Image (cartoon, helix red, strand yellow):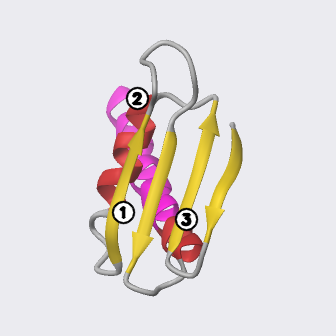
Amino acid sequence: MEIEVIEDKKSKFVFEIKGVQEGILNALKNELHNDDHVKIATYSKKHPIVGNPKMILETDGADPREVLAKAAGRLKKANDKIRADVKKEIK
């Protein structure tokens, strides 16, 4: 995965993500919406087959990079729990 920053301001962070499926972006977008500081969290893709998605994150003044990192951390924790639960059930 490669991230290219397009816009980095006090309360807005826009970046393009290369090598990520949209399902992960949907999960990230949904997790960002759980944060009270998030005003806008969405992504767009110019063409469904070619090009890379661009994620847009706007906050109420909170550092958008920190908000993004915390949301990614919560997703990782949820993923780790699912993985552990599945392994427990398979054994």
In the image, the segment drawn in magenta is: 71-91
Q: Residue at x 39, y 54 (%)?
A: 78
Nearer to us in this view, 54 or 23: 54
Amino acid found under the numbered disc labelled 2: Lys
Q: Position of residue 12 (x, y in %)?
A: 51, 70
- Give the residue pinned by disc 1: 32
Considering only vertical position in the picture, is 84 above or below 18?
Answer: below
- Give the residue pinned by disc 2: 91
Task: State how far apart marks 3 and 1 are (Cα).
Answer: 13 Å
In the image, residue 87 lies in the stretch drawn in magenta:
yes
Q: Secondary structure at mark 3?
A: strand
Nearer to us in this view, 33 or 53: 53
Q: Secondary structure at mark 2?
A: loop
Amino acid found under the numbered disc labelled 3: Phe
Mark on residue 13? 3
Task: State how far apart marks 3 and 2 are (Cα).
Answer: 43 Å
